[in-house]
Amino acid sequence: MIKITTLVLSVSAFVCLSAQQQMSLQDCELAFQKNNLQVLASQYNINMADADILQAKIWELPQISGYVNAINPEDKRVFDVGRAKGVEVSQLIYLGGKKKNEIQFAKSNKELAQLQFSQLLVDLKTELRQTYYNLIYEQKKRTSIESQLKYMNDLLSAYKTQTDKGNISLKDYVRLQSIVIQLNNDKIEINNNILAFQQKMKVLTGSSERISLDLPKTEENELLVSQPFGDLEILKEKALVNNADYLYNLRLIDNSKFFAQWQKSLNTPDLNLGAEYDQNSGTFRNEINLKVGIPIPLWKVNKGNVERAKYAIQQNEKNSEYQKLNLETQVESAYQTWKNQYDQYFELKPVDLENLETVYNGILKNFRSGNVSLIDFTDFMESYRQTVLQIYEMKKQIMISAEELNQLVQTKIFY
């Protein structure tokens, strides 16, 4: 029976491990590129833009019409096809560069679709990387809290026994219990955060399994100490050159100009050119005639759309000015946010972090030996709990703010 139970537990543990997918940041990015449904769906916008270009190149179909005699009043015959019939073929000829302008506008739309797709990739990749760092540091917080909680639960159990025997006051037991309650609250909050970030990571990577992430210590240290290339002004210049969202607004000006040019060309009348064969109803028998038709340009039939297109150009020019100012402001804010987080964390020296762990281990040992009072112990444990969570939060915020800066500049900016 014992062997069977052991086997069942082993199989269950294996199943749990199999359902958990261990992934590095590179693994997450690769899965994102292959499986993200939002990216895969957005790619079709470019395909549809290609189809619009193809459609713009297509001319109107030629038209053919004909007639046959229905009633011959002279010979009192019906459908006298042998002596009275005709046929006409015509083709609409575009004038004023309509097709050229329409194609140019369609190509501009494709460029806009490509820029929108590029920005979507940047936004989603930033969300992926930020989610990754959120998960990493929430997991580290949980590990620390669980370690503290294990020790405190064992201690609380021992105090409960002594309290029941009357050897320790209820006040001391309650003091310890308050720390355990706080640690449990922290654990619940952290677990909820982890659950939310895991769900987001599943959507971003297209994975149906629970994802467990890993960030090696050496890689973490390299990321934390990374510094941006150049100063703030250089970062602003790079953003103006590379930011797809800003470039989209710039190209939108050209796009509106192409549209205005196309609308203006629609005021030019088109030529309808054709040839006609008539067997018996014209001046001559079996005559072939050339037919030419063109609307009389008494007024501009597309004047309203032309005016609207002109206003669209002015509107997009103002929007691009706003986007430039907004982008530069966002880069400045993101850079300062990153620098604040960076400076705050690196005010702590490595020896400070080592001392924190040394004192923590020393407090635990001395409390067991009776060399530290309960009040000093609980005060330190509360301070230690808060400090550890704050340190992990500082590390996380350095990563998050760096990704926000990357999102805006959209080129390699960190060493």
Image (cartoon, rainbow, N blue to C red):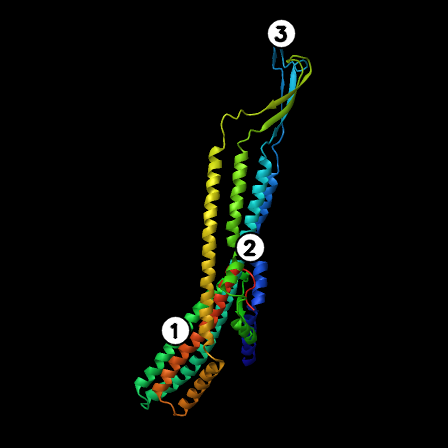
Question: Could you give the CA–CA distance between mark 1 and mark 3, rounded to whole angstroms?
Answer: 106 Å
Asked whether residue 266 is in view, the answer is yes
Q: Secondary structure at mark 3?
A: loop
Amino acid at the residue labelled 2: Ser
N-terminal-most mark, 2 or 3: 3
Graded by Cα atoms within 10 Å as few (under 14), some (14 to 19) or many (20 or more), the crowding at tag 2 reads: some
Q: Residue at x 53, y 54 (%)?
A: 244
Asked whether residue 41 is in view, the answer is no
Q: Which mark is residue 74?
A: 3
Picture coordinates of residue 55, whole percent (x, y): 60, 39
From the viewer's side, name the closer residue of 209 and 52: 52
Amino acid at the residue labelled 3: Glu
Q: Position of 388 compared to 241: left or right?
A: left
Q: Secondary structure at mark 2?
A: helix
N-terminal-most mark, 1 or 3: 3
Vertical position of residue 95 compared to residue 128: above or below = above
* Image quarter (top left, top right, bottom left or bottom right) of the N terminus: bottom right
From the viewer's side, name the closer residue of 305 and 144: 305
Question: Could you give the CA–CA distance between mark 1 and mark 2, rounded to whole angstroms?
Answer: 42 Å
N-terminal-most mark, 1 or 2: 2
| Residue to which mark 2 is pinned | 118
Picture coordinates of residue 371, whole percent (x, y): 39, 92
| Residue to which mark 1 is pinned | 185
Picture coordinates of residue 204, whole percent (x, y): 52, 60
Vertical position of residue 235 compared to residue 280: above or below = below
Amino acid at the residue labelled 1: Asn
* Circle 2 or circle 3, nearest the eye: 2
* Image quarter (top left, top right, bottom left or bottom right) of the C terminus: bottom right
Quarter holding residue 148: bottom left
From the viewer's side, name the closer residue of 199 and 294: 294
